[in-house]
Image (cartoon, rainbow, N blue to C red):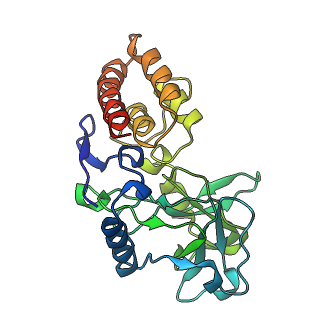
Amino acid sequence: MMKALLLLTFTGVAFGSSLSSLPPFKELSASTQQLLLETATRIGLGNKPLAELPESIKPSNAKFSLVADYEHAANGRIPVYLINQSGDVVSLGAEDRDVYLELEFQDTDGEWKRAQTHNFSWCGNSYMFEPPLKDQHFIALSGYQPKSGSKARIRYRLYRQLFEAVSNVGEGIIDPAEVEAARHDRMVVLGAPFEYLAALAQGKVPEPDLGRWSGGELAIFELTERGFDPARVEEVLNAIASGEGPYTGAARTALKQFAARERQTKRRR
């Protein structure tokens, strides 16, 4: 599906526009829906009915289940099943077929941290297709495992979606070098929960070390792009825009873009 791109001008990088800016799947024509489903199948993200799940895979009662099959790891990958029992079709945020399935591990303090780095594509075309997942269907994914490293308690999480999905826990491999690198990539912000994004944009938490990237500006971008409650987003942006902080200009620009998109969404409805 083609869609307009928004430029993250303060970093000079193009990202795909938000899921919330697109018409819901069920509002598309039958022919467009079928085209999207066929495209998803061609790129390895085809929808399959729950009856075709392996017998060992048991979804939870949640709207979305993420189940890792640690017993059938092969070729350095772990099968992971994303299961939709929400009662509706969901469009997945994606980048070049990647639905942001990330490896996490439990550290010695019991905290879960990302153990997989992510380098966002500079090309807007990478974000133009959002694979659909129908209700009572699943998609088979492939969980990353490094070629070498140390054993750890691991799990998988979906990032940058309009819903939360975390897998069951198992034993796997993590690479300490990747764990360290993951502390400084843009996924630290692009994929964080609303509360952290709001605090970061307002300067209430320490700025993460992202090299040349501005954590606060990335947070403002992510607040407007992830499909969060518009009232909550506007409250945060207005607070920033009315002040004299380093992100005042970015917040004012984001408010104008956000308001224009919300008007467009309301007209479409």
Could you tell whether 71 is left or right of 34 in the image?
Answer: right
Where residue 39 appears, as percent x and y from the top left, is: 33, 74
Q: Looking at the rendering, in which quadrant would you find the N terminus?
A: bottom left
Q: Is 26 on the left or on the right of 179, as rendered?
A: left
Q: Quadrant of the C terminus?
A: top left
Q: Can the viewer see residue 242 in this picture?
A: yes
> Residue 217's spot in the image, x, y percent?
37, 32
Judge whether residue 123 can be spotted in this image.
no
**Residue located at (29% from left, 59% from top):** 128
The image shows residue 187 at horizontal and vertical percentages of 46, 50
Query: Outermost residue, top direction?
Result: 243
Q: Residue at x 40, y 61 (%)?
A: 94
Instruction: Judge by depth and name the residue closer to the eye, 240 or 172.
Output: 240
Q: Looking at the image, which is closer to me, 151 or 236?
A: 236
Q: Is residue 46 above or below residue 227?
A: below
Q: Relative to residue 75, is residue 121 depicted above or below? A: above
Residue at the image position 53 percent from the left and 44 percent from the top = 192
User: On the picture, is 73 further left or further right than 182?
Assistant: right
- Identity of the residue drawn at 52% across and 55% down: 159
Total numbered labels? 0
Q: Residue furthest front?
A: 30
With 158 as the anchor, is 72 left or right in this view? right
